[in-house]
Each structure stands twice: as C-alpha cells, then as structure tokens.
Image (spheres, rainbow, N blue to C red):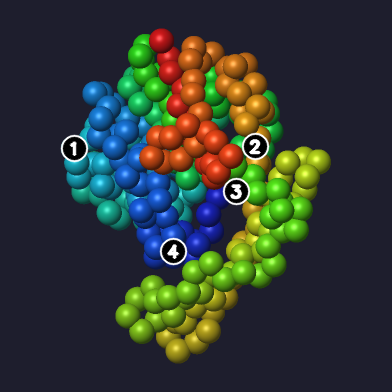
Amino acid sequence: MSHVYPGNFARFYDTIYHTLRDGVDNDFFLHQIKQAKGQVLEIGAGTGRFFTEALHAEADIYGIDISPAMIEILRGKLAEDQQYRISEQSMVDFEFPFQFDLIVAPFRVFMHILEKEDQLRALDNIYHHLRPGGRFIFDTFVPDLNQLIEGINDVTDFEGEYEPGKWLRRRVTTRPDLINQLIHIEFHLEWEEVGHRMEEKWALPLRFFFRYELEHLIERSPFDNYQILGDYAGNQLDKNSKEFILVCDKV
C-alpha cells in the first residue's frame, strides 16, 4: 500500500519538517484536535509533530503509523503511562475497540494510498471508527500542472544543522507518471557524522488527486456530508488554492 520511513529519514524528520511545515498546517490541525469533545485519532502520527503538542494540551488522542522507525522516535517522547496511545497500524485496516469523535490524517498521509480499492477501504474503516456526529479531516495538495509535467531535478529543500556543528542537507527529485497519477519521489540525504560525510537515498510514490476525483471518492464512501477547503485558514477553494482539505462528516 505504501512505503515506510527508513531509519535515518525518521531520525532527521523533526529537524526537516519542523522547519518546512510548522506555521503551515499545524495551527489548523491542532485547533481541530483541541476543539474535539472526545477521543481523537491521528493517522500517520509519525514522530509526533502534532501528537505530542496535542497530548500536552490534554487531548485524548491516539496515534497510528505504519513506520516502526517513526513510532520508535515518538515513543521516546512519551511517558511510560502514555505508550498505549501509539500503535503500528495502517489506515486501511486499523482496529480499535472504541470509536472516535475526530480522526485526522494530516500532511498528505492519504496520498500514500495508491490504489482506489484501498482508498475506499480506508474511508470505510475510518467511517466505522467514528461516532455519530464524528468528523474525518485529511489533506492533499492541488497538483501544479507545470511541475507534474516537468518534475523537479535535484532541488535542495532543506539545509541546516541537525545538532550543533553537524550539517544536514536534503535534495529532492521527482518523476511524474501521469497515466497512473503517481509522483515518484527520490529523497537524497547528506549529513556529517563523526567527521565523515554520510548519505542515503529513499524513493517512494505518491498518488496525486484532482478536485472532482476526490469528490467522487468521498461520494462513493459512507460519509454523509463533506466540504473541501482551499487552505489552512479555512477558506473555500478558488483559482489560487494550493491545498485540498477534505472535511467529512458522519451524521
């Protein structure tokens, strides 16, 4: 269904994405989590960029992720009596003995599901894990057609220190598969460690979506109502929108 994060990519995840994403989407999702009246599930909790702050705000939050390396880092941030909140599960077939008031899948998690059958299975599973009146929120990006056609060639998207005096850089290359609506991404990490230059590559596919495809997908699911927002400020879609933010309700 998807690709798990390798160890070094999980190791440097916080360093990279606290820089690239904080101030973009975290206020939106954390607000949704803190406003929830009951239990919350974060799908793709990762290393806890949202999860740990939500837990500190006393949200009754649980998290799942398919990547053992990411979960190991998150567990290291949690007290022993909170470890039960995290489990290694997939959004397609996760199981809990109770339902949630809110389920979120932030930062492109849904784009890791490549096949429509698995997408529908995931939506069914999420729906059945929501209480009546519950809500599911996930996001994908609005495809940039020029970038889809041309791809990205070896662009540095992060460069900085991961520890004092220790340098880290990430480069990204993308190759589109327009027929199958996939973006093949290769990440190239380079970093300093014990006086040596280290490097590692990791490739994965992401499924991109268009607006009406998302609408058809949700309308095939059990969800009763939905809306698509165009940004993390809650504005409606327009010609300048860069995000599809799906808000799906179970009546």
- Provide residue 36's location: percent of width, then percent of height: 27, 27
| Amino acid type at image mark 4 | Ile
Q: Do the residues bearing badges 3 and 4 touch, measured as CB atoms within 8 Å?
A: no
Q: Would residue 214 be found to the left or right of residue 231 on screen?
A: right
Compute the Cα span from label 3 to label 4: 19 Å
* Element class at badge 4: helix
Q: Nearer the viewer, mark 3 or mark 4?
A: 4
Q: Nearer the viewer, residue 5 or 109?
A: 109
Q: Do the residues bearing badges 1 and 3 touch, measured as CB atoms within 8 Å?
A: no
The answer to whether residue 37 is above or below residue 152 is above
**Image mark for residue 209:** 2
Q: Earlier in the sequence, mark 2 or mark 3?
A: 3
Q: Earlier in the sequence, mark 3 or mark 4?
A: 3
Q: Earlier in the sequence, mark 1 or mark 2?
A: 1
Q: Nearer the viewer, mark 2 or mark 3?
A: 2
Question: Residue at position x 54%, y 19% from top?
Answer: 124
**Image mark for residue 217:** none
Question: Residue at position x 62%, y 69% from top?
Answer: 155
Question: Dot 3: few (<14), some (14–19), or many (≥20) neighbours within 10 Å?
Answer: some
Question: Residue at position x 49%, y 48% from top?
Answer: 67
| Amino acid type at image mark 2 | Phe
Q: Which residue is mark 1?
A: 58
Q: Nearer the viewer, mark 2 or mark 4?
A: 2
**Image mark for residue 3:** 3
Work out which quarter of the rendered image holds the C terminus and state it: top left
- Provide residue 176's location: percent of width, then percent of height: 74, 52
Question: Dot 2: few (<14), some (14–19), or many (≥20) neighbours within 10 Å?
Answer: some
| Amino acid type at image mark 3 | His
| Amino acid type at image mark 1 | Glu
State whether residue 134 appears in this view.
yes
